[in-house]
Amino acid sequence: MKNKETNLKSLFLYPLLKAFGCCLALVSSLAWANLTFENAHVRLLPPNVKNTAAFVSITNTGQEGICLVKAWGDKSQTVEFHDHIMQNDMMKMVHVPRVHIAAGETVTLQSGSLHLMLLNLTEKLKLGDSVTFTLEDDTEKRYTFSATVEKVQSSVSHGHKHHHH
């Protein structure tokens, strides 16, 4: 009878311990990857404009690199990572499928460079409004932050050339 009782206990405890061990492993791996967000803001544009950009400094405080692959926002249908490249003497904006942030590093999303593009706004943004963003990494971990709508000057010339005499 004692063997049967021991077998029943082990049949019950083994899956429980195995599941608990997996949870511990998951919790410890999540502790290694963390992002902080600073200076988050969204560019205020005229009410008839359907797209705008968001800027933020993202710091990876973890001990492993993080690769961001998806983004969402609560005020637009789509949010994508975009960057500016020079092509044929013209500045061109391109979609960036992933943004890698090395351990201990900061990536600054800013005007004229890497940024978040809000496409097809679902409501008119007003000065001071808050926009909530969720970013997802390649392990499906999600990070959320809020940004305030502000007047932002563009640092991109968009191909315009000015000559001063």
Image (tube, helix red, strand yellow):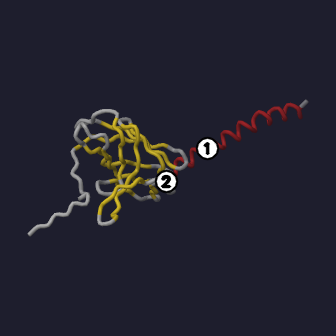
Q: Is residue 11 left or right of residue 65?
A: right
Mark 2 surroundings: few (<14), some (14-19) or many (≥20) residues within 10 A: some
For the residue pair 10 and 113, the one nearer the viewer reads as 113
Instruction: Identify residue for label 2.
Output: 67
For the residue pair 155 and 62, the one nearer the viewer reads as 155
Which residue lies at the image location 41% right of the left edge and 53% below the top edge?
A: 95
Residue type at mark 2 is Cys
Q: Is residue 76 left or right of residue 3?
A: left
Q: Please, what secondary structure does the residue beneath circle 2 have?
A: strand
Residue 142 percent across, percent down from the top left? 48, 43
Which residue lies at the image location 33% right of the left edge and 64% below the top edge?
A: 86
Q: Please, what secondary structure does the residue beneath circle 1 have?
A: helix
Q: Is residue 32 left or right of residue 22?
A: left
For the residue pair 96 and 3, the one nearer the viewer reads as 96
Residue 119 percent across, percent down from the top left? 36, 42
Judged from this view, the residue extending furthest toward the right is: 1
Identify whether 62 is placed above or below 145: below
Which residue lies at the image location 23% right of the left edge and 48% below the top edge?
A: 152
Mark 1 surroundings: few (<14), some (14-19) or many (≥20) residues within 10 A: few
Judged from this view, the residue extending furthest toward the left is: 165
Instruction: Identify residue for label 1.
Output: 24
| Quadrant of the image containing the C terminus | bottom left
Distance in Å between CA atoms under marks 2 and 1 = 23 Å
Q: How many marks?
A: 2
| Quadrant of the image containing the N terminus | top right
Residue type at mark 1 is Leu
Q: Quadrant of residue 162?
A: bottom left
Task: Decide which of tag 2 and tag 1 comes sooner along the chain.
Answer: 1
Which residue lies at the image location 35% right of the left edge and 61% below the top edge?
A: 85
Residue 65 percent across, percent down from the top left? 50, 57
Residue 121 percent across, percent down from the top left? 33, 37
Q: Nearer the viewer, mark 2 or mark 1?
A: 2
